[in-house]
Structure formats: structure tokens, C-alpha cells
Image (cartoon, rainbow, N blue to C red):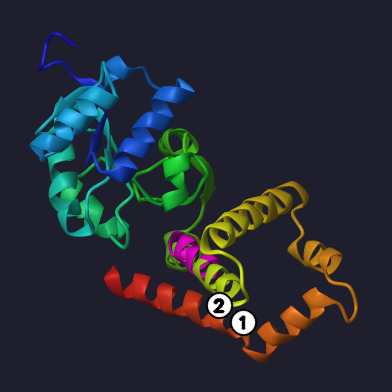
Amino acid sequence: MDDDSAQVELAIIGGGNMGAALLGGLLDSGAFDASVIAVVEVAAGRRDELASQFPGVRVEVVVPRCAGAVIAVKPADTPAAASAAGASGAARVLSIAAGVRLATIEAAVGRDVAVVRAMPNTPALVRLGACAIAAGTSADADDVAWARQILAAVGTVDEVDESALDAFTGVAGSGPAYVFLVAEALIDAAVAEGLEPDMAERVVRQLLLGSATLLDRDGDPTRLREMVTSPNGTTAAGLDALAECDLRGAFGAAVRAATKRSSELG
């Protein structure tokens, strides 16, 4: 826009990985035109990168006048970002800051501003994210639909009560790290059994990609596991070893610990 004081339809406050992922998804999906979006970033070098990556999008150091805002900053910076969004005229705010409660955001953004809180995960960076959203006290169905439209540009979206966001964080928010740890462990095990490291890495990446694709298509992990497992075969032997290590219990403990930590952060 030529007039720097003109209101934008959407301000994305925070131009880091998640903010940029959302911006890219929105532009690619056609949900928003570049001319109606601004991204706010305090780091000068990052502003230059964003301007180069997203031509036509306003790149600002402070929050411009806006109809709505996405808060994509660190949790500690969220209240200040929410306050700036409210002061800049935002009628709707979507926060993707981990662990920051609706009440905290609502108190910071000001009265009569609709707030929706979201928990996305890092696969949003490749448009395959899983996200949950919870509506604040002033958010109506249109506000939730607005938030859903933004987040759907980078993956799936489920609406839950805020009380369920901690559990969602424990599974989907932290879950990519669990999967990456499984990948590390499988690569190490393959190398220990004699495969070359490059081959082990390539094979594990492909088996995770292929397995996830099968699961997405068929939707039944139990049936898929049983398809691979012949009685007294190699897979059965491997699964028996995992059962002895209580793999299910380990994952349960991981999700419980992450859920508990999420609740403590709020």
C-alpha cells in the first residue's frame, strides 16, 4: 500500500518460522491477498528476509492499524503483542503462543475484542500441521470461522474447549519431537546392525513417510500393524521386544508429562 497509515485486514505479529508459515499458506491458498496483510517483526535482518520472500506484503516494525491480528511471538511477549493489537484497532485476535491462556490474552487485548487461542505444531511449516483452537468469551461463530480459515491454510483444525488444549499440546504440539526421536533411534539401530549411515537415514525417512501416508489413507493403525505382523515372523519378534520395554507406557508417560507442563506454563 502506498499509504502506510492505511488499515490492513490482517496483521501477523511475529515473523519467525510459524508466522512466516502462516503467511505463506494464506497467500498460496488465496485466502488473503498480499496487499491486505502486514507482518510485524522487530529484527531488521528478518524484516529484510520477509520483504524478499513475500513481495507485496507490508513488513512493519510496529503493529499497523488492522482489522484482525495473529499473535505469533514468544509466550512471554504475548501480552504486549495482544495489547498492541487491541490498540491498533483489531476486532479479532488469534494467538498461537504456547501455554498462554485466553484470560491472559483477553485481559491484555482489551474489552470487546474477540480472542481465539490456537495450538499448532511444527508440520505447519510444510502445510501438514495439526491445530486445535478454543474460543474466548467474546468470540462468536464468525470469529471461530475466521481463525479456522487462517489455520486451515497450513493443516487441519479442530475446535476444542480450552481445557483440552493442554492434552492436545502433549500429543500434537510435542508429538513431532517424539516421532523425530523414533527416527533417531531407528537410524542408530540400523547402523548398529550393519547398514551404512546414509542408507539408514534414507530408509528411515522413507519408511516414516510411507507409513504416515498409509495411515492417512486407511485411518486404522491397529489393522495396519496387524497387516505387517505375521505370526512368529520378524515383525512379531520386534514388537515383542518393544512390548518388553513398555513402549506404550513410555509414550503415555511422555504425553502426560508434556500435558502437565503445558498446564503449568499457563
As rendered, which of 6 and 136 lies closer to the eye?
6
Residue of label 2 = 251
Horizontal side of 181 relative to 64 (left or right) equals right
Does residue 219 appear to the left or right of 198 in the view shown?
Answer: right
Residue 70 pos. (x, y %) = 29, 39
Q: Where is residue 219 drawn, in percent x and y? A: 74, 54
Residue extending furthest right?
A: 231
Image: magenta residue range: 173-183
Our reading of the magenta stretch's main secondary structure is: helix
Tag 2 secondary structure: helix
Q: Position of residue 150 (x, y in %)?
A: 42, 34
Which residue is the extreme one toward the top? 2
Tell me if residue 132 comes above or below residue 196 in the rendering: above
Q: Crowding at label 2, few (<14), some or many (≥20) Cα neighbours within 10 Å?
A: some
Rendered position, 262 above or below 137 = below
Q: Is residue 180 in the magenta section?
A: yes
Whether residue 44 appears in this view of the structure is yes
Type of amino acid under label 2: Phe
Q: Quadrant of the C terminus?
A: bottom left
The residue at which mark 1 appears reads as 247
Of residues 162 and 214, the one nearer the viewer is 214
User: Label 1 sits on what residue type?
Assistant: Leu
Q: Residue at x 45, y 20 (%)?
A: 30
Q: Residue drawn 78% across and 51% down? A: 218
Q: Are marks 1 and 2 in contact (CB under 8 Å)?
A: yes
